Amino acid sequence: MDINSYRVPLGVCAGIAPFNFPAMIPLWMYPVALVCGNTFVLKPSERVPNTAMFLAQLALDAGVPAGCLNIIHGSREAVQFICQHPLIKAISFVGSDQAGEYVYEEGSKHGKRVQSNMGAKNHGVVLPDATKETTLNQLVGAAFGAAGQRCMALSTAVMVGDARQWIPELVEKAKKLKVNAGSESNADVGPVISPDAKKKIEDLITSGEKEGAKVVLDGRNVQVDGYEKGNFVGPTVITGVKPSMTCYKEEIFGPVLVVLEAETLDDAIKLINKNKYGNGTAVFTNSGAAARKFCMDTDVGQIGVNVPIPVPLPMFSFTGSRGSFRGDMNFYGKNGINFYTQLKTVVSQWSFDDSVYSPTVAMPVNK
């Protein structure tokens, strides 16, 4: 008697991708699905539709059979189609909280397997023993790169103890970043995706002021020569932020760094664990004991030690957790293989003779 388990394809799988990484995030999805033997339907963000078409053409050029990778365009109706169509067996989603919750609930309601990566509020905890210059450079790059429009942006700095004295130097480094169109060679911070996104970011900055925080570097109303109507927000640093403030509780998704202070590492860990999100965090220190404590006690899915944006390489998995993720299996790596396949188990028995056994109602056993 033999028992064998196999991983087999699910059939048709689908992905819903955001605007901010229109190539990278689809590449988390459909290559893994196709390699596992599935076909795939990809819905890119309606704000950046062309990249998905280029990727599909590259797939065809590389020899992927026609019909294996399919692109559909649209907004809510396209999402509903994916969530409700009976032939689609699994959905991968990356995007906002509201859309991610909808896709998870609607897809699950229709019997689909769903992995949904959503919002984040990633904290960078700076201990006084960190290497100052390197740490400040990493904070600035991780906070303002991609104009803060990435789910792994280090949007919250927690200065522990005497590290609070570094805040003026942090602000000076942020001031030096050049705001310009992304097509310009000297651009450090480009525009945000839309006028609505710009307004939301500026409203959250204003809310911090109204609730008692201090905007020590203000990127509102920034003007860029030649692009006066662009959706630009300059690097912004808000200090004196408290956990009760709206600018802390909500994901800003723009070039804004909110700065909090903590007396001890334990206080910083408690702060992070009380936040609803669990996508990523980082600690900056030269103490191995402090780093180990942080990694063990912090309830966040991805942690960097002197690494500001701890996105795993493809052989691992993107392991955001808590309010940043819905589902049971994360993106890519071994989790990705498991997500796009299901187990099939075969039990077989072969006899060397043609003996006739009497019927039995006992459980079958291997003798």
Image: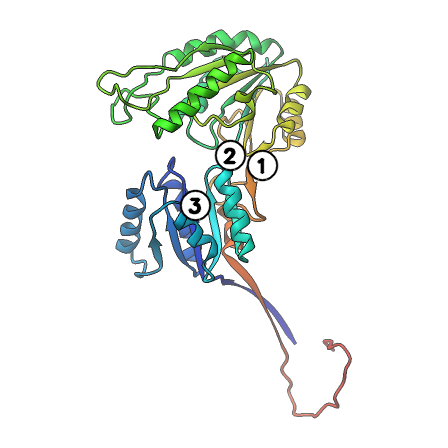
Q: Looking at the rendering, in which quadrant would you find the C terminus? A: bottom right
Please report the residue visible at 43 percent of the width from the left and 45 percent of the height from the top: 28
Q: Position of residue 169 (x, y in %)?
A: 47, 8
Kindly check if marks 2 and 1 are in contact, taking CB atoms under 8 A apart as contact: yes
Quarter of the figure that contains the N terminus: bottom right
Q: Earlier in the sequence, mark 2 or mark 1?
A: 2
User: Would you call the spot at circle 2 few (<14 residues within 10 Å), some (14-19), or many (20 or more)?
Assistant: many
Point 27% across, 16% down: residue = 224
Q: Which mark is residue 28?
A: 3
Q: For residue 112, which numbered disc appears in the image? A: none
Decide which of 130, 275 is in the foreground and name it. 275
Q: Is residue 232 left or right of residue 360?
A: left
Colour convention: rainbow
Disc 1 to disc 3, C-alpha distance: 20 Å
Residue to which mark 2 is pinned: 119
Q: Residue flagged by tag 1: what amino acid is it?
A: Gly
Rendered view: 19 above or below 58: above
Residue at x 56%, y 15% (from the top left corner): 241
Question: At which x and y percent is residue 366?
Answer: 72, 76
Cα distance, mark 2 to mark 3?
Answer: 17 Å
Q: Which mark is residue 323?
A: 1
Q: Nearer the viewer, mark 2 or mark 3?
A: 2
Of the residues tagged 1 and 3, which is closer to the observer?
1
Q: Earlier in the sequence, mark 2 or mark 3?
A: 3
Amino acid beneath label 3: Trp
Residue 301, how many percent across, how many down? Answer: 58, 36
